[in-house]
């Protein structure tokens, strides 16, 4: 069995969490990074893929969906992982399952796990923590058992199938501050090519607010305009409190 970890992880939490789960399932993993364009490829029935995406507004990020459509499968088994920032993941797993099945995958297991909210780090702060890591290892063991069981039943995950929650791209765009040294890292790393020749030149229609430019900036010069973020923060604060639980679906 050849194993491939497929991730879309602008600020790194999805990939970090996916690697914990992956290493509890199998030892060796190839990787596909959906932050970059993907050429058409086909997996076989002997392969296993772990597909890990963050939840954006309770949906899968649009760009990750576009890139996943280049990946085809011929009865390949898939494990789904959704990472979310302690609010809710709503239709993320159901949308991912639908898309992967359209591509020819057989979805055998899924998990939802919490990581720090990449826009507001205080939500889900410090997660995944040691308790999460122990639980993800346990999830990995159960998934391994599920993979070894012949003819196990079909996977059911929460969320609407087909009629997903509408997604609205937020209004704010991460802006550069005086600490910017014009090194070009944000431009090179932006998954949607939203940044032009100068750091201030951002196309708001291309920007998906994934926070990658904020997280890769070597001088910490990029951040969303606090004034524009304030209404979103006030709306999310009551929804992101308390410790949400990781979940496993087999
Ligand atoms: C544009 C955007 C939308 C998000 N929407 C949600 C959401 O609906 N629910 C939630 O709990 N977290 C939400 N988050 C938080 C991310 O799902 C979470 O921080 C995830 O760990 C980010 O993954 P990454 O570190 O791999 O980029 C959102 C983050 C961004 C940037």
Image: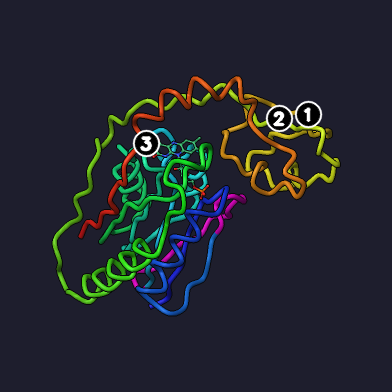
Query: Magenta span covers which residues?
Result: 33-46
Can you tell which mark lies on residue 200? 1
Q: Main secondary structure of the magenta part?
A: loop
Colouring scheme applied when the structure was drawn: rainbow
Which residue shows up at 24% across the image and 35% down it?
160
In the rendered image of this protein, does residue 14 appear above or below residue 187? below
Can you tell which mark lies on residue 240? 3
Q: Which mark is nearer the camera, 2 or 3?
A: 3
Tell me, yes or no, whether the two marked residues, 2 and 1, touch with CB atoms within 8 Å. Answer: yes
Q: Residue 42: say if magenta.
A: yes
Q: Which of these two is toward me, 130 or 155?
A: 130
Tell me, yes or no, whether the two marked residues, 1 and 3, touch with CB atoms within 8 Å. Answer: no
Cα–Cα gap, marks 2 and 3: 25 Å
Q: What is the x, y in percent for residue 111?
A: 30, 56
The residue that label 2 is drawn on is 175
Q: Is mark 3 within 8 Å of ligand 1?
A: yes
- Along the polypeptide, which appears first: circle 2 or circle 1? 2
Cα–Cα gap, marks 2 and 1: 7 Å
Q: What is the x, y in percent for residue 200?
A: 78, 29
Q: Residue 198: say if magenta.
A: no
């Amino acid at each position: 069995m050849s194993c491939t970890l497929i991730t879309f992880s602008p600020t790194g939490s999805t990939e970090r969490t996916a690697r914990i789960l992956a290493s509890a399932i199998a030892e060796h993993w190839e990787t596909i990074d959906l932050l970059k364009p993907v050429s058409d490829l086909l997996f076989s029935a002997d392969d296993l893929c772990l597909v890990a995406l963050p939840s954006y507004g309770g949906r899968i990020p649009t760009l990750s969906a576009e890139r996943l459509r280049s990946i085809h499968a011929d009865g390949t088994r898939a494990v789904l992982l959704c990472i979310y920032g302690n609010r809710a993941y709503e239709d993320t797993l159901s949308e991912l399952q639908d898309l992967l099945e359209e591509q020819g995958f057989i979805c055998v297991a899924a998990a939802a796990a919490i990581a720090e909210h990449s826009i507001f780090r205080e939500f889900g702060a410090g997660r995944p923590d040691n308790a999460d890591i122990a639980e993800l290892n346990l999830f990995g063991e159960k998934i391994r058992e599920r993979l070894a069981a012949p003819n196990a039943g079909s996977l059911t995950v929460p969320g609407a199938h087909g009629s997903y929650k509408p997604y609205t791209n937020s209004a704010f765009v991460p802006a550069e501050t005086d600490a910017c040294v014009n090194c070009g890292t944000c431009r090179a790393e932006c998954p949607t090519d939203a940044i032009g020749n100068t750091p201030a030149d951002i196309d708001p229609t291309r920007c998906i607010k994934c926070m990658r430019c904020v997280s890769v900036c070597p001088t910490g010069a990029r951040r969303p305009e606090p004034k524009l973020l304030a209404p979103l923060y006030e709306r999310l604060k009551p929804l992101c409190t308390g410790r949400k639980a990781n979940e496993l679906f087999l």
